[in-house]
Every structure is written in C-alpha cells, then in structure tokens.
Amino acid sequence: MSVRIFIPKDAAALSVGAESVARRIAEEAMSRGSAVEIVRTGSRGILWLEPLVEVETSIGRCAYGPVAPRDVAGLFDAGFLTGGAHALAHGAVETMDWMIRQNRVTFARVGAIDPVSLDDFRAHGGLAGLERAIAMRGADIVDSLQASGLRGRGGAGFPTWIKWRTALEASADQKYIVCNADEGDSGTFADRMLMEGDPFLLIEGMAIAGLAVGATRGFIYIRSEYPHAFRTMSDAIGVAEKAGVLGGSVLGSGRAFRLEARLGAGAYICGEETSLLESLEGKRGVVRAKPPIPALQGLFGKPTVINNVLSLAAVPSILADSAQAYAEYGVARSRGTLPFQIGGNVKRGGLVELAFGATLRELIEGFGGGTRSGRPIRAVQVGGPLGAYLPANQLDTPLDYEAFAAIGAMLGHGGIVVFDDSVDMAKQARFAFEFCAKESCGKCTPCRIGAVRGVETLDRIVAGVEREKNFAVLDDLNKVMTDASLCAMGGLTPMPVMSALRHFPEDFRRPPQRQAAE
C-alpha cells in the first residue's frame, strides 16, 4: 500500500524549492523500493517552514520542514514515512500551535487537498453550500448573506448583501458576477493562496452569487503576476464544467452559470472595481465616475456583482453551515473571520485566519514571533500601501472595522507589514505619494497631480526648506486628495502619510543631511 506524501505546489513553496524536493522524494522512494503517492497541494500558510512536506500516518499527517533536497535521504533514514523523529519534524499538522489557534473557515481545505480534484473537494465538504442554494429563492440567499453579517473583505468593509440585493432587483436581460482577484496590495497573498489551494471554493461562491441575483455568466480577473493561480483556476473551471458544476444546468438545476478566468493587465489601479470592469471590456484601466454603480450598470452596461476573492469564498460556508454559525465568529458589526497575512520584518511570516476581534499584538508576536531582526517593533502598516502606519503603542487595537476606523486606519485585505526601529517613516510617507504617482490612472487631477506634488513637498520638508510652510501645504494637499479624488487610489494615499506624520513627527524634523564634499 502506498504512503501518501503531500507537497505544496503553491507559488510561495515553489519559490523556495518545492519542485526539487518533490522530485528528490520520488527518486529516493524509487531507489529504496518504497511505494509512495505524491499529492501536490496548496500551502498551509506556514511560510517560514516551506517547503513543508506532510506524510499520511496512523496518527495523522505529520509535517516536516523546511525541507531541502539534501534533507530527503536523511528523512527516509529516520523513517519519516511512518512519522519518524527528525530535526525537521513538527508532529501532526492538526496539533501544531500555528494551526490549532486559528479559526479556519475559508481556508479550512487549503493545504489539505489536491486543488484540482473535485472528488477531494467534495470529500471535505465542498459543494454543500451550492446544493443548498439551488433549493432556495434568490432573495432568500441574499437574506442569509445579510444575516451572516458578511462585509467586503477588501477596502471599506461594505456589506456584501447590499450589492447582491441591488443586482437581484435590477431588471436586465443579462447579469454578471465578477471576482476581483487583482491582488496588488503589498503584504497580501491570501487570494493567490486560495486560488492555488482551493479553487473550487471560489467557483462555488461565484455560482451561488449567480443563482442569487440571476446572473448566468461570471469572470475572475486575476492579477497578471499570478500565473500559477491563473493556471490552477482555469484547470478547475474545466473540471467543474465537465462535472456539471458549471454550464447550462448547474448541478442539474436547469439554471445556467458559466465562468471564465481572465488575466489582468498588470496595473494596480485595476484593483479598483470600475477600472477592473473597463479592463475586462478590453479598454484601458481607467476609473469610472459613480453613479451609476456596477450593481446597476457594470460590465458591458449590465447589472454586475463585483466582489473580491475572500468575500465570494466566504459564501459557501454561510449557506452550508448557516448564517448564524458564521455570525458567531467576530465582534459587533465585524462578523466572521478574516485571513490575515503577516509579512515584512517578522520572524514567522504567513497566513493566519482568525475571527475579528483579535489584536495586532496577537498576530505579530503570538504568531509571527516578533521581528526577524530582533529589534523592537516601531511601525506596522495594515491594509496595503494605502493603509495607515500604526505605532507600537497601538498593537493592542482589536482587529475589527470600527476599531480601526476609530484610530484613522483600515483593515483592507488583511495584509500586515512589520517594521523595526530602523525604519525611516519620512521615507515611508514619501513612498506612498511616489506609489500613487506611478499607479494613478490619471483621470482625476487630485490624484494625478496631487501625488507628484506630495513627493516634491515631502522632499522639501526633509531637506529643511521652509518646513512650517511646507507642512501647511502638505496638510492642504492631503485634504484635497482625500475629499476630491475620484476613487480610493487618490482618496486613501494621504492615510499612510498623515499617520506617519501623526505618530512619528520626529522623522520629518531631523536636521537635514549635508551633502558629502565631492
């Protein structure tokens, strides 16, 4: 009987040699006459241990990592096919501290299954939500979404059910479901991990959305830098079509839903929903004015529900396990769970799914182990390159939408980037303007020109040129960009700048450095 060995083919694992490890294990097993079956999976999100190899044993799946090709012979010698002791051994995955302290709902299957095996997906509870949705009216599905408290897992945390209800009540001969998988924020990788590790979950969520609002076509707009995710999603869509999960009659219901994966255009601005729709239509990615909102006039002028990956992937469990079960996670108006991504200067980076209400300190110190450099934490940026910088004295802030709004911050997509006390916050503030200047679509003046002026003004401040006057200019500039930009690209750029000024003013008032004599 073959021993099953699970090795990730997630992009993060591949980047540190997972392919070579898989090949070496197959060669070693053959040379020793050991019968093994290698199953390629997604990543568990324990990224500091990648490549993480799991072996199916009588006590569960035993983990070894990080495994390099040179370690393979020694693992076989130690009897790792039966869970033998080794310096790289971490015991059963289910008992690892990193895993047992999480609330894995959306990511329950990621790392555990073969991503493109529909049988594996079903065996682990997949399609239960879709099967239930087929027996429900569209309005009842939306009611369940409302009762769950699900909010968009992207920027402002807008209630998901409102978009769905608006599209449901719109009258049109064609409606669309669009998934925003253009994950461009720094420090984020949850969308990629889910598409590479459990693509059928996203397919199921989008099919439920189609049934809910009466949409028969869907598109997944995937970031151009994600070739592995695009390939895995495309393969999974093909499998789903052949199995009747997608197509002219979803699971034999007589109701149609067809789905396509599209590769993005390589622009950060296409993460903004209307710019994404422009790109999907084959146009340049430029922000549209609103109204009309996409739920009424979206893709090709038709009612369109557009949500991001994590929002749509949360839907199947809400239908399968009940809205109440999902709403029991979290606090106040922040219900359910969010996959947080820990990166930057941190000892143990990776993905952690927790109910809302945990703290930054719990994530960074409890899971991340503190800074990799061993120096004190000085700043943490949450919510991508346009998120606020928070000082160490705010690490105990609860991770929920309202608590973050109260301190002038946002959760965004759950990306957390850690900086130690060597960081120059004036440079980080400058980077926000510089990033906006590069990535702006150019349609509105506050964003297009404001970001360029922001870089210039900050340079004058750092150089010690009429600082007080330039601080006043910077304050006015931030207000104009916040209030007058057409979309969140320009509207949120001041957030990291203002937070850096508020919490780390000393970095902007240092004596200017003299140029070295030539």
Image (cartoon, rainbow, N blue to C red):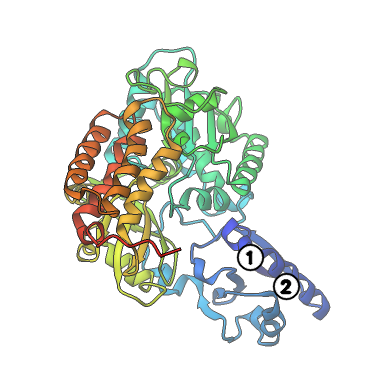
Q: Residue 282, percent across and down?
A: 57, 23
Q: Quadrant of residue 246?
A: top right
11 left or right, relative to 419: right
410 left or right, relative to 62: left
| Image mark for residue 25 | 2
Does any portion of residue 130 appear in the rendered image?
Answer: no
Q: Residue 486, percent across and down?
A: 33, 27
Q: Which residue is mark 1?
A: 7
Q: Find the distance from the CA under tag 2 to the CA under tag 1.
A: 10 Å
Residue at 24% from the left image edge and 39% from the top image edge:
478
194 left or right, relative to 170: right
| Circle 1 Cα neighbour tier, 10 Å, few/some/many (<14 / 14–19 / ≥20) | many
Element type at marker 2?
A: helix
Q: Quadrant of residue 434?
A: top left
Q: Tell me the quarter of the image containing the N terminus.
A: bottom right
In the foreground, 130 or 296: 296
Whichever of labels 2 and 1 marks the residue nearer the N terminus, that label is 1
Q: Quadrant of residue 249?
A: top right
Q: Residue 339, percent across and down?
A: 39, 54
In the foreground, 117 or 283: 283
In the foreground, 276 or 92: 276
Element type at marker 1?
A: strand
The extreme front residue here reads: 518
